[in-house]
Image (spheres, helix red, strand yellow):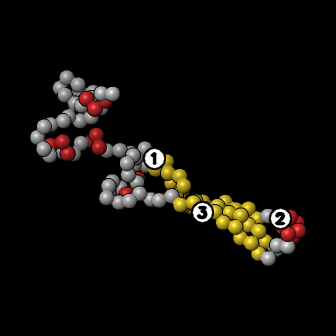
Amino acid sequence: MQWHLDYWTPQNTDARFPRLRPSPGVNGLGSDFWMVNGAFLRVKYLQVGYNFPQSLISRIKLSNLRLYVNAQNPITITKVKMMDPESRGDESTYPVMRTFTAGLNVRF
């Protein structure tokens, strides 16, 4: 693949990447190329549980039985790549971690 050769030149004004210069520091100048749409949708916390009916659990001498699953940050929908959209462009922050937990509450 030669996509990295698609940079701006006077002959290639519709390039994918901004111009490249051999001198240090010039390639990092501000450009609208680096701007991205920072919109995102994130589900921060989700819990799904089920309480078993009393008619079913009374047979095994239980007063309550609940099964549940928790999810923290399970879904993030965004076009931002390589960084967390909530970091507002600060690349020195760690991304938000996803955490999944399952549990069982039993009462005798």
Which secondary structure, mark 1?
A: strand
Q: Which residue is mark 3?
A: 101
| Residue 86 placement: quadrant | bottom left
| Residue 64 placement: quadrant | bottom right
The residue shown at (47%, 59%) is 97
User: What x and y, as percent, mark residue 99?
Assistant: 53, 60
The residue shown at (71%, 64%) is 67
Q: Which residue is mark 1?
A: 78
Q: Amino acid at mark 2?
A: Pro
Quadrant for the N terminus, please. Answer: top left
Q: CA distance from mark 1 to mark 2?
A: 40 Å
Which mark is in front, 1 or 3? 3
Q: Which residue is mark 2?
A: 53
Mark 1 or 2, nearer chain start: 2
Position above or below: 13 against 72: above
Mark 2 or 3, nearer chain start: 2
Which secondary structure, mark 2?
A: loop
Q: CA distance from mark 2 to mark 3?
A: 23 Å
Q: Amino acid at mark 1?
A: Thr
Between residue 18 and residue 54, name the one nearer to us.
Answer: 54
Quadrant for the C terminus, please. Answer: bottom right
Dot 1 alpha-carbon crowd within 10 angstroms: few under 14, some 14 to 19, many 20 or more: some
